[in-house]
């Protein structure tokens, strides 16, 4: 199973179909006991003003994760990041809740990495329109699906 917010479940289903990946998509937010600590990898590319935050584990308490995520995003913005990517684990049911919250505050789905992560992005600076002519022919269907 992969867990995605209901807001983007149809898009993920289309992408899986285009890539010929079998996906059993789950969107129900039943409670799941979490254990451990927040695990993540943060990559900052100062010249490009871009940050990539890959979440590996949400930790034991969702409230603690929410607070940590808000402070992390604030810190990235203060450091000058104009584009923030957040990768959420598709094998964790909490991705439905966390991803849904991020989508509601202006993040958008932009990737499906290795079948393991849902990539969300938020562009803070000047928005650039996707030039479909520069996308290779075999990727245009996917670009049309996610390039709203």
Image (spheres, helix red, strand yellow):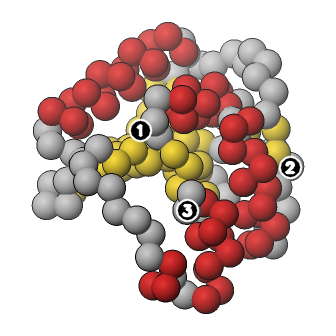
| For marks 1 and 3 on the same chain, the one whose residue lies earlier in the sequence | 1
Could you say which is closer to the camera, residue 105 or residue 96?
Answer: 105
Helix, strand or loop at label 1? It is strand
Vertical arrangement, residue 64 with respect to residue 71, above or below: above
> What is the spatial separation of the Cα atoms under label 1 and label 3, in whole angstroms?
27 Å
Q: Are marks 1 and 3 in contact (CB under 8 Å)?
A: no
| For marks 1 and 2 on the same chain, the one whose residue lies earlier in the sequence | 2
Could you say which is closer to the camera, residue 90 or residue 145?
Answer: 145
Dot 2 corresponds to which residue?
Answer: 24
> What is the spatial separation of the Cα atoms under label 1 and label 2, in whole angstroms?
25 Å
Residue 91 makes an appearance in the image:
no
Name the mark on residue 116. none
Viewed as shown, does residue 29 lie left or right of 72?
right
Helix, strand or loop at label 3? It is loop
Q: Residues within 10 Å of mark 1 (few under 14, many from 20)?
A: few
- For the point 25% across and 27% down, the residue is 74
Could you say which is closer to the camera, residue 143 or residue 92?
Answer: 143
Dot 3 corresponds to which residue?
Answer: 147
Expressed as whole percent of the image width and height from the top left, the position of residue 114 reads: 61, 62
Viewed as shown, does residue 48 lie left or right of 115?
left
- For the point 73% across and 19% down, the residue is 32
- For the point 52% across and 22% down, the residue is 59
| For marks 3 and 2 on the same chain, the one whose residue lies earlier in the sequence | 2
Name the mark on residue 40. 1
The image shows a total of numbered marks equal to 3
- For the point 76% across and 22% down, the residue is 29
Helix, strand or loop at label 2? It is loop
Vertical arrangement, residue 125 with respect to residue 128, above or below: above
Q: Quadrant of residue 22?
A: bottom right
Vertical arrangement, residue 135 with respect to residue 97, above or below: below
């Amino acid at each position: 199973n992969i867990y995605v917010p209901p807001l983007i479940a149809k898009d993920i289903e289309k992408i899986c179909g285009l890539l010929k990946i079998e996906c059993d998509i789950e969107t129900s937010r039943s409670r799941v006991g979490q254990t451990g600590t927040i695990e993540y990898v943060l990559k900052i590319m100062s010249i490009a003003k871009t940050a990539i935050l890959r979440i590996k584990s949400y930790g034991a308490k969702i409230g603690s994760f929410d607070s940590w995520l808000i402070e992390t995003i604030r810190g990235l913005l203060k450091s000058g990041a104009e584009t923030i990517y957040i990768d959420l684990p598709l094998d964790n049911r909490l991705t439905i809740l966390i991803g849904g919250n991020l989508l509601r505050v202006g993040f958008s789905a932009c990737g499906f990495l290795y079948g393991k992560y849902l990539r969300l992005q938020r562009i803070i600076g000047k928005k650039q329109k996707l030039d479909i002519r520069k996308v290779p022919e075999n990727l245009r269907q996917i670009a049309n699906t996610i390039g709203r």
